[in-house]
Image: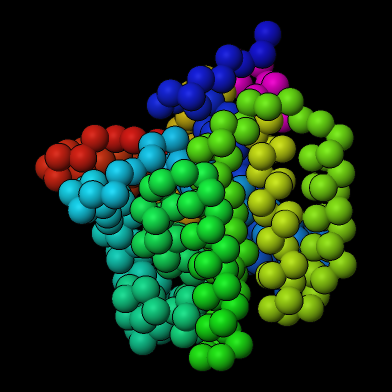
Amino acid sequence: MTRGVSPGRFDASVDVARASLMLYVVAYLHLGGYVGDGDTHVGWASAAITQCVLGTFTFISGYLLGRHPLKLEAAAWLAFYRQRFWRIYPLYLVALACFAVTGLTDWRTATKAALGLTMFFPPSPMTLWYVAMLMACIAVAPALLIGTRKTTLLVSAAVLLFLAGWQLCIAPLDTRLATQFAAFASGIVVARSHWRYLPVGWGLLTAAGLALALQLSTTSRGDLSDWSAIPAVCLMPLLVLRALDALPAQVGSNRLVRMLSYGSFCAYLFHRVVYGAFERLMHFDQPLHHWLALLCLALPAVMAVAVLAQYLYDRLFLSLSGLRTSSS
């Protein structure tokens, strides 16, 4: 039995994607950085895989927003910004403060990140650069959500040209913004075009394969790899969602999957803080023992902190702000 996908509020494939992709970042990519020399668990293709993983997260954010077009009205835009601000920014500020206090970043970089400047004036704080990038995408999102699909494509192209011009003519850019913005805009285009539910043909598969080949061929070439990854992060997330749509319905409705998805944002924000505290309390001579301890003790602690933090934030803060819980 396969899942019946509905364009409504609950999307089981999105929950499965969020849970599994978050585990890749938190339970594998970053956790492995605390064991041994921090690099033994990654290989030549890891950068490309990570670009696609984060691109899928960003694509999903755009996709969920794209299901609710906006009118060209000041009140609608203000309501959009208000909801996204309160849903993201306070938790982001807390995470930045935790990073600065624990030495994961310096206060100057944290302040720049809080003001949304680090994407255009690097360096960005490790890990939390993603949230700074997401806020930049959300800042231009209303312009992508008005008008027709053609309007979305034109605005998306204009933003990418602006980013290229900034990098070439003004100042060094954190080029991960270009990669992830492309994924974000693609999610909106897919939602507005209703392409999510179209059959996957050989044309799409061939295009995705060529995009991956381009990405892998330039994976070690610095800023160029972020630009060359754009076709892959635009196409692969759609294939990921379509593959997840074919899973049995019980997978998406599993309580553990829903919990991991629910806590995914806070897990991303705070996992390095929890890992750092764990590292200061415990020491291991054998890498295997270190891995096991991190997986069996630190990772569950991360998820417990994440779910609790998100729950308390939703109940004590968002409810007082009059914002209802939403998957977008």
Q: Residue at x 65, y 66 (%)?
A: 33
In the image shown, does 221 or 304 lie closer to the viewer? 221
Q: Residue at x 72, y 57 (%)?
A: 231
- x and y percentages locating residue 234 in the rendered image: 66, 51
Q: Is residue 169 above or below residue 9?
A: below
Q: Quadrant of the N terminus?
A: top right
- x and y percentages locating residue 198 in the rendered image: 68, 27
Q: Residue at x 72, y 30 (%)?
A: 243
Q: Quadrant of the C terminus?
A: top left
User: Magenta: predominant secondary structure element?
Assistant: helix
Q: Residue at x 42, y 65 (%)?
A: 136
- x and y percentages locating residue 216 in the rendered image: 84, 63
The magenta span reads: 243-251
In the image shown, does 207 or 33 lie closer to the viewer? 207
- Residue 60 in sight: no
Q: Is residue 224 left or right of residue 167?
A: right
Q: Is residue 245 magenta?
A: yes
Q: Quadrant of residue 245?
A: top right
In the image shown, does 311 or 138 lie closer to the viewer? 138
In the image shown, does 88 or 228 lie closer to the viewer? 228
Taking the view exactly as shown, the residue that stands out farthest to the left is 320
- Residue 29 in sight: yes
Q: Quadrant of residue 67?
A: top left
* Colour setting: rainbow
Q: Is residue 83 magenta?
A: no
